[in-house]
Image: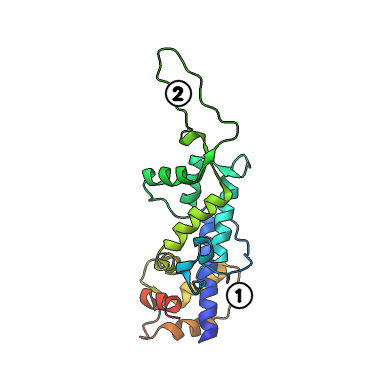
Amino acid sequence: MATSMNKMSSYASGSMNDYADRNQHNLSMRPGSTRPSGRFAPPIQNPAHAEPWDQISDEHRSEINDCFALFDMNKDEALDFSEFRYALQALGFSSIPRSDLINTFKSAAHPRPNWTPLPSVPNQPPPSATPGVVDLRLPREAFQAIAARYVAARDPREELLKTFALFDKGGKGVITVDDLRTVVKELGEDVPDAELASMIEQFDVEGKGGVSREEFLGIFLDR
């Protein structure tokens, strides 16, 4: 059973990587160094006393770093607000209210280099003595901390259900041998049909010919 579970986890992670490649600006997945790799890596032992960056998997860290590199358009190791917003959207956080994004950005950003207040103009309101959002830049470390906080707070079922939908071709509500065969081919692997059938049978506890959403979640969340 452990072998089947590890393979299913590998295909699930690979499928989500492929999903990111096709739908999130072709982000590359680079290996990390300290945490177990994989989107479904287990949490650390005592997350209440750890920084969000230490709670997430190496794969998520790589995604965050890749997003930063992609949207740091002028390669100055900092993001303006628009770059920050689009980077979070690429990571899957597209529903955060704009006001929350602005407050989060302002709390961690710094004035851009050489920023100075605008000169006064007669008959116009005095210029602000502090930089506005457009004058702020968010360094890499701050973006890592913010993005990691969002990732660490995300319900793991959300990503698993996205993965299930990628496996479940046609939205049948179950993953069949044909579905799994399609996924492994998309990932460039050659797996005998007998092995694919064995994997489905291992987790299809009701013998209905496929793995349901509940069974799929159980593969990853009940271990």
Q: Nearer the viewer, residue 125 or 182?
A: 125
Q: Secondary structure at mark 1?
A: loop
Camera-nearest label, 1 or 2: 2
Q: Residue at x 54, y 66 (%)?
A: 57
Q: Residues within 10 Å of mark 1 (few under 14, many from 20)?
A: few
Callout 1–callout 2 Cβ contact below 8 Å: no
Dividing the picture into quadrants, the one containing residue 6 is bottom right
Q: Residue at x 58, y 43 (%)?
A: 78
- Going 36% across and 47% down the picture, which residue do you hit? 97
**Nearer to us in this view, 162 or 39:** 39
Q: Quadrant of the C terminus?
A: bottom left
Above or below, 14 relative to 70: below
Q: Could you say which quadrant of the image residue 74 lies in?
A: top right
Query: Residue 54, relative to residue 99: is it above or below?
Result: below
Q: Position of residue 141 (x, y in %)?
A: 57, 52
Which percent across, then down, holds residue 47?
47, 69
Which amino acid is tagged 1?
Answer: Asp
Residue pointed to by mark 1? 190
Q: Is residue 25 visible?
A: no
Image: 212 above or below 50: below
Mark-to-mark CA distance, 1 and 2: 65 Å
Q: Position of residue 29 (x, y in %)?
A: 60, 60
Q: Nearer the viewer, residue 145 or 16?
A: 145
Q: Residue furthest top?
A: 122
Q: Quadrant of residue 211?
A: bottom left
- The answer to whether residue 179 of the structure is visible from this angle is yes
Identify residue for label 2. 127
**Residue name at image x 55 percent, y 71 percent:** 184
* In the displayed structure image, the side of residue 73 where residue 86 appears, left or right: left
Three-letter amino acid code at disc 2? Pro
Instruction: Identify which residue, 28 or 154, lies in the foreground.
Output: 154
Q: Earlier in the sequence, mark 1 or mark 2?
A: 2
